[in-house]
Image (cartoon, helix red, strand yellow):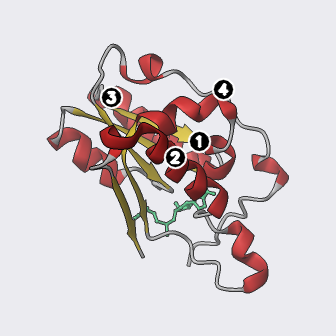
Amino acid sequence: MRQHVNPLSSNFSQIQRIPSLREMFGESKSNLHLDIGCADGEFLFDLALVNTSWNYLGIEIREKLVKKAKLKVLEREIKNLYFLFGNANNILNDFQSKFIIKNLKSLSFNFPDPWFKKRHYKRRVIQPEFINRYKESQQKEGENKKNNKFISRI
Ligand SMILES: C[S@@+](CC[C@H](N)C(=O)[O-])C[C@H]1O[C@@H](n2cnc3c(N)ncnc32)[C@H](O)[C@@H]1O
């Protein structure tokens, strides 16, 4: 069984610079979907190849998987798919990523690491701080965000 990565480890306290949407997806203004804890990105590759009119962003804390996924994107010349490495909570709570949350049309967490013990709840990828920021951004945008989707598969 895979050992879960501790997202609170000091290895993940610094985040890398977050590229702009233009750096990730060029001039495309397509709807943006974010998958948090995307592993090797299999789910996103499937979506990105079928729904070419959407942009897909994955965040994953295991660097090896992100490197592999990025290489696959380059080799296949996929323009609507991008991966970020790091602790999703540090990335999404950072001021640099404001634009990501603002532009999200849908969001998924598929099978997040459970962290059953109460003393480990802080390690869970779904944290109230992010959910509240996401909710606030949805409320601010009002009507435009009415049909946004939030998917969590456990
Ligand atoms: C059980 S796996 C599910 C992977 C994938 N979503 C799927 O459905 O196959 C959970 C994934 O979330 C990643 N993960 C856990 N905590 C994370 C965090 N704080 N930030 C980013 N990724 C995280 C893990 O490394 C792992 O790849």
Q: Nearer the viewer, residue 146 or 114?
A: 146
Q: Pointer 3: what residue?
A: 75
| Residue count near mark 2 (Cα–Cα under 10 Å), binned few <14, some 14–19, many ≥20 | many
Circles 1 and 2, Cβ within 8 Å, touching? The answer is yes
The numbered disc on residue 85 is 1
Q: Earlier in the sequence, mark 1 or mark 2?
A: 2
Q: How many labels sit on residues? A: 4
Confirm or deny contact between disc 4 and disc 1 (CB under 8 A): no
- Structural distance between the alpha carbons of marks 3 and 4: 23 Å
Residue where numbered disc 2 is placed? 59
Horizontal side of 16 relative to 138 (left or right) equals right
Return the residue nearer the eye: 146 or 12. 146
Tell me where residue 149 appears, x and y as whole percent: 32, 55
Farthest-out residue, right: 10
Quadrant in the rendering for residue 117: bottom right
Nearer mark to the viewer, of 3 and 1:
1
Instruction: Kindly identify the amino acid type of the residue bearing the numbered disc 1.
Output: Phe
List x then y, in percent, for residue 58.
Answer: 45, 45
Circle 2/circle 4 CB separation < 8 Å: no
Which quadrant would residue 96 be assigned to in this image? top right
Residue at image position (46%, 47%) is 139
Label 3, label 2: how many angstroms apart (C-alpha)?
A: 20 Å
Tell which circle, 3 or 2, labels the residue nearer the N-terminal end. 2
